[in-house]
Image: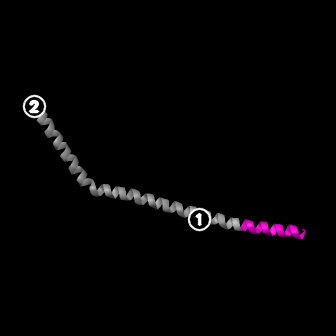
Amino acid sequence: MQPEEREMLKKALELSRENNKMLQSIKRSMFVGRIFRVVYWIVVIGAAIGAYYYIEPYLDEAIGAYGSIKGDLKNFGDLLK
């Protein structure tokens, strides 16, 4: 092998090692990003469920009040007939 070919081969090897390091870094960052995305959605869904659990009694009370008012208005309408 001639010295020029050997030098070109060394440069190619160096570039391939550098590319391998960059690709491994990209792969690692994608993996960490996926983990954080999953954790993010677990927190969002958990917060929504927690908020619903917290306000459920108030919702039930409001729905009951609405049903009561609706029934009273219907009775009032029947009185006017």
Q: Which mark is residue 28?
A: 1
Q: Position of residue 57 (x, y in %)?
A: 24, 54
Q: Quadrant of residue 80?
A: top left
Q: Which residue corresponds to the image point at 28% horizontal and 58% vertical from the top-left?
A: 54
Q: Which mark is residue 47?
A: none
Crowdedness near tag 2: few (<14), some (14–19) or many (≥20) residues, C-alpha within 10 Å: few
Image height check: is 70 above or below 33? above
Q: Main secondary structure of the magenta part?
A: helix
Q: Position of residue 9 (x, y in %)?
A: 82, 67
Q: Disc 1 or 2, which lies upstream in sequence?
A: 1
Residues in magenta?
1-17
Does the magenta run of residues contain 8? yes
Q: Which residue corresponds to the image point at 54% horizontal and 64% vertical from the top-left?
A: 32
Q: Amino acid at mark 2?
A: Leu
Left or right, 29 with respect to 54, comes to: right
Q: Amino acid at mark 1?
A: Arg
Left or right, 38 with respect to 12, comes to: left
